[in-house]
Amino acid sequence: MTEAKSSIDLTDTVWEEADEDTQARVRALCIEIDADPDDLSEGYNETTFELSRRKAKHGTSPKKAREMVALLHEALKLAGVAPFRREDMHRDTDKAEELRQLDACIVHATGERCRELCNEREAVQAWPTYHTIEAQLRANPESTELLNAGIHTVLNTLYFVSPDTDSDTNAADHRDTIREAFDGVEIQDRRTEYDTNSGEYQVLTDDEADTVWEEELQNYLDECVLPELPEQARMYFDEERWKRDAKMDGRGHSLNRYDGSELYQDDPETGETYYIYRQN
């Protein structure tokens, strides 16, 4: 099993003479995308870097799976969802059928047997399913807003943990990797190697990402939303509420122009956490 680099030495690379801030961003980016420093060149500003054609791995790495599961656990905790094991989860259809059968039995039961069936029904009603947990997460938006992550990022992990994806053949490797991380067992690296075209990455601190996010949302409002509104309606449009709703999708939705994701990585030398957004 191959893990990504845990440290990067910039000695004898094109970044050896770069300032400390740039070197920290380069180290974090190289660790996160498993790239060689000499494969990177300067982008259109001091926070962006161009990657040359190289070998890359497709799929979900063990490291990424652990991060996704940790984020899910934190979101569940903030939303007040009771801890559960993966084997405790059921499909919504199975839960509905079990309740239907119990209801049919309760109608004809009396005395102690009726009480037993009612207790059993209460236990079945508490079975966790994807949609019941999803509802709790959506009812508590702070569970993902506090993590600077979109609700869809958390729900993606939850979906592949749930039995609803047991027969999913299109994303079986991703599902199995996520489930191993959730179960706390050894995680198999199922990624495949391929040649990738160059890509540009923006590498930002947390504060920088928030600032750029706000700017991107305001630019979208000014250029795409407000011009389409009738002049007499603009004074009634709540820009802050629109931004608040837009932020439910997370920063990656606005800042990553490639696939909408947000990656993050600590620089091992400074400890600074950088957030990484692919641009093309």
Image (cartoon, rainbow, N blue to C red):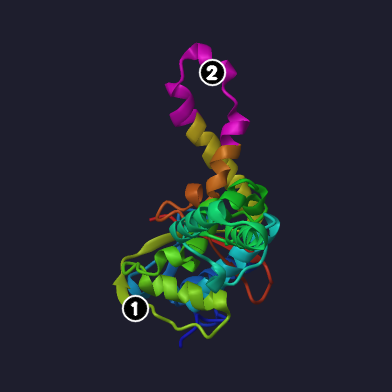
Please report whichever mark, 1 or 2, sits nearer to the chain's N-terminal start: 1
Under circle 2, the secondary element is helix
In the drawing, what numbered circle is on residue 192? 1
List the residue tagged with mark 2: 234
What amino acid type should be assigned to the residue bearing mark 2? Arg
Does residue 18 appear anywhere in the picture? no
**Residue 205 location in percent, x, y?**
63, 58
What amino acid type should be assigned to the residue bearing mark 1? Thr
Taking the magenta stretch, the answer to whether it contains residue 242 is: yes
Is 25 situated above or below 236?
Answer: below
State the residue in front, 15 or 163. Answer: 163
Does residue 116 appear anywhere in the picture? yes
Marks 1 and 2 sit apart, C-alpha to C-alpha, by: 50 Å
Under circle 1, the secondary element is strand
Give the magenta range: 222-243
Q: Which secondary structure class fits the magenta region best?
A: helix
**Residue 125 location in percent, x, y?**
59, 57
State the residue in front, 27 or 60. Answer: 60
- Residue found at the far bottom of this picture: 1
- Residue found at the far top of this picture: 232
**Residue 210 location in percent, x, y?**
62, 48
Residue 245 in which image quadrant: top right
Residue drawn at the location 45% of the way across and 53% of the way down? 260
Taking the magenta stretch, the answer to whether it contains residue 175 is: no
